[in-house]
Each structure stands twice: as structure tokens, then as C-alpha cells.
Amino acid sequence: MEENVFFKSDSMEWVDLGGGVKRQIMGYDENVMLVKVSFEKDSIGAIHDHVHVQTSYVASGKFEINIDGRKRILSAGDGFFAPSGKTHGVVCLEAGTLIDVFHPMRKDFLKA
């Protein structure tokens, strides 16, 4: 079986999460998952937590990031790290995109 090792954004499905947020899974195996998340201005990535370790890169836009009650404004080129079990969320101040990496992969993001 041939592995999928290259991913073209224009051929990857977007999932509308509602509220001006959509997600595109770019690639994964059982250890890691790369996800692109697009936000419209004023959309919210609700405060949540999970067992996965997450690191995120701000590809475009401006976001207020909240990690465990600590807030920072981040713009294109910035990033953040959300440790396992720590609450985190975002408010999109200027339309943009986050690139999220999860370890292990997020099975809950896959279709049943």
C-alpha cells in the first residue's frame, strides 16, 4: 500500500465547524496530525482542553490566544504551545489561519 506523503491544499476537504471557522486536515499518522484552521474576523475557537499536545503557528491574521487564563495577542509569524490538559482557545481579531500540530493525532477529527 502506497503511503500518502504529499498533500495539495486545493484537493483537501474543508470541514465547516460553524461560526466562521473551518478546518482542513493536511496529513497525519497515529503519532502526529497537521491541521489548517481558517477563521473569519470575530469568530471564536472556544475554550477547551484535550489530552493531545498542541503547537500552533499563526500563518495569517491576528488572534487573542488564551492558554490556561493567560492571554496574548499574536499575529502572522507568531505561535503558541498548549500542553496536554491545559485549557486554551482563540478569538480572531483579524481574519486569518492557524496551522495546528497535534500529538498524538486527533481521532475525533476523522469522519466515523
Image (tube, rainbow, N blue to C red):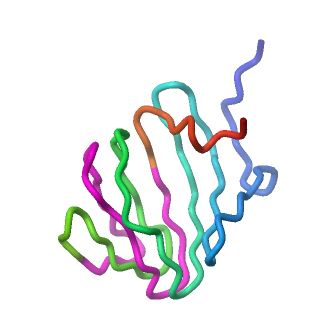
Q: Nearer the viewer, residue 65 or 86?
A: 86
Q: Nearer the viewer, residue 17 or 103?
A: 17
Place of residue 11 in the rendered image (x, y in percent of width and height, measured from the top left): 81, 51
Find residue 104 and report its horizontal and vertical position in percent.
43, 32
Which residue appears at 51% of the width and 39% of the height? 106
- Residue at 18% x, 71% y is 70
Q: Is residue 101 left or right of residue 68?
A: right
Quarter of the N terminus within the rendering = top right
| Magenta: main secondary structure | strand
**In the figure, is residue 57 to the left or right of 33?**
left
Most extreme residue toward the right is 11
Q: Does residue 98 show up magenta in the picture?
A: yes
* Residue at 32 percent of width and 62 percent of height: 88
Measuring from the top left, give residue 25's x and y in whole percent.
Answer: 63, 48
At 34% from the left and 39% from the top, the residue drawn is: 51
* Image height of 108 relative to 40, above or below: above
6 or 25, which is in the foreground?
25
Left or right: where 42 falls relative to 82: right
Q: Quarter holding the C terminus? A: top right
Q: Is residue 59 magenta?
A: no
Q: Which residues are magenta?
A: 72-100
Question: Left or right: 35 with respect to 58?
Answer: right
